[in-house]
Every structure is written in structure tokens, then in C-alpha cells.
Image: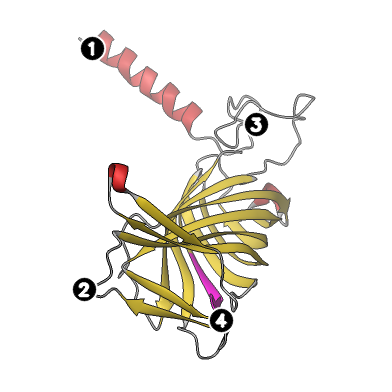
Amino acid sequence: MIKNLTILILCLASFTATAQYDGKGENEVSRFRPGFIWYFTGLKPAKVEKVRKYDRLIFDVTYNDWIGDRDLFQNHWSSIGLNTNFMFDIPLSKGNTVSLGLGVSHEFKVIRHNGLLIEDELAGTTIWQEKSAIDKFNKGIFGGNSFTIPIELRFRKESWRHFKFHLGGKVGYQVNAYSKYVTGHGSTRDVEKDYGFSDLNGLIYSAHVRLGLRNWALFGSYNFNTIFSNSSSTKLNHVQMGLSVSLF
């Protein structure tokens, strides 16, 4: 019994020693494994003195909403989007505990709402209107694609299983946006899609934050500019909340 207990204690101690990676030891098995794609070090093996870099390929899976003339959390839970971020991680301190993130990002968003986006081409406005009893559509969707340049100030502990905090912003362009209304089901299903928003705000500038551990983080973002630019249009600012996964 004592022999078995001794072996168990030694195994646990060995596991703990290898698990607590701090990025400094000569024999650390995880020296060059910053993310899910752990074994990729480029065309050549990584040098011993090479600084570890993190969060270079990040996917943000988001719930999308808007705020302004409409309150938060009034839209359907299936308002899901995806941000794909290709980033450089530029160390600003020894051990890369403080770094600068800079790159390019693609954002796809879907906001499922129970209303109508009515465009007045003559006035150049877009008004959100509550669905009435005579409106027969099952669901209304506002969606679109954009490209942005993100920049982040990153703070992290000097360890493989590090705690991290990213504070950043994005500047970019809304490539397209559409409204879609679905009526009926199955063989009677009819989809009406419209890309015409005369006052769509092409400019995007936003702030975002990530807070998490190692490859995982909670994500939040707020667009300072409204989706529609006309002062007489419904005031809606895009908001995102979700989970970030860093693969490399």
C-alpha cells in the first residue's frame, strides 16, 4: 500500500513539474507550443532563445446585436457571426508579457430581428419598424461583411497557461449589408433579399476587449459609428459578445 502510494505521489509530482511551463527551462516539453497548432515553428526548428508569440490566428464566435434606438437583447439568440483575425504579435517587453497586436480582420455578422428595415430612397433614410399583424414573414435578418485593421495592446503572464487581457480597436470598411425576410416553410418557403441601403455607413471604427486564459477568451466589441448614417434614420450601433479561440 505504501509502495503504491509513493509511486502515485511521484507520478503526480512529475506531471505537475511538466505542466507548470514558465517558458524558461532547458527541458520544457512545451517550449515552442503556443497554441493549438503547437508543432508549427516555420520552415526551420525554433531557436532556443526565440521569444514565444501568441494569438496570431484568432476566431471570434459572436452573438450580434445593436443598441441605440433599440435596446440590447431584443433580438433572436441565433444572431451569430464570425470574425477571422490574422495578427502579428510584436513583443514590447522581455518574455512577451506586453505586446502589440496588428493585422487584418474579416467580419461576418447576422442579426435576426422581429421587425422591418424600411428604406426611403428619396429621403435617403432607413427606419426600423416593429412587425405588425399584417406582416407574414417568419423572420427578418440583417447581415453583412466587413474588412478592418485591428490593433491591440496585449497583456499576459509569462507562462504557457497564461492569463491574458487584450484591449484594442478596429478601423475598416463595411463591404456590403443586406436585409432578408423569410416567409413560409418547406416547399412554400419564400426568401426576399435586398442589398439596397442608400445611407449604409461604410466606415467602421470600434473598440474591443478579450479576457481569458491561454487559447480561450471572452470577447466584446462596440462600434462607435451607427450602422445607418442619415441623422433621420434609426440610430443603431453594432455590438458583439462571444468567445475567442486562438489557434496559433
| Image spot of residue 32 (x, y percent) | 65, 31
Q: Amino acid at mark 3?
A: Phe
Asked whether the beta carbons under mark 2 and mark 4 sit within 8 Å of each other, the answer is: no
Q: Residue at x 58, y 29 (%)?
A: 30
Q: Nearer the viewer, residue 45 or 238?
A: 238
Residue 2, label in figure: 1
Dot 3 falls on a residue whose secondary structure is loop
- Residue 121 is marked as 4
Q: Secondary structure at mark 4?
A: loop
Q: Along the polypeptide, which appears first: circle 1 or circle 4?
A: 1
- Magenta stretch: give its range: 221-229
Image mark for residue 135: none
- Seen in the picture, residue 135 relative to 158 is either above or below; the reply is below
* Residue bearing the label numbered 3: 32
Q: Residue at x 61, y 75 (%)?
A: 201
Callout 2: SS: loop
Residue 27, quarter of the rendered image? top right
* Label 2 environment density (alpha carbons within 10 Å; few <14, some 14–19, many ≥20): few
Q: Please give the name of the residue rendered at 79% of the width and 25% of the height, measured from the top-left corner.
A: 43
The type of residue carrying mark 1 is Ile
State which mark lies toward you, 3 or 1: 3
Nearer to us of marks 1 and 4 is 4
Q: CA distance from mark 2 to mark 3?
A: 60 Å
- As measured in the structure, the alpha-carbon distance from the residue carrying label 3 to the one carrying label 1 is 38 Å
Q: Residues within 10 Å of mark 1 (few under 14, many from 20)?
A: few
Q: In the picture provided, is 36 more to the left or to the right than 149?
A: left
- Mark 1 vs mark 2: give the one in front: 2
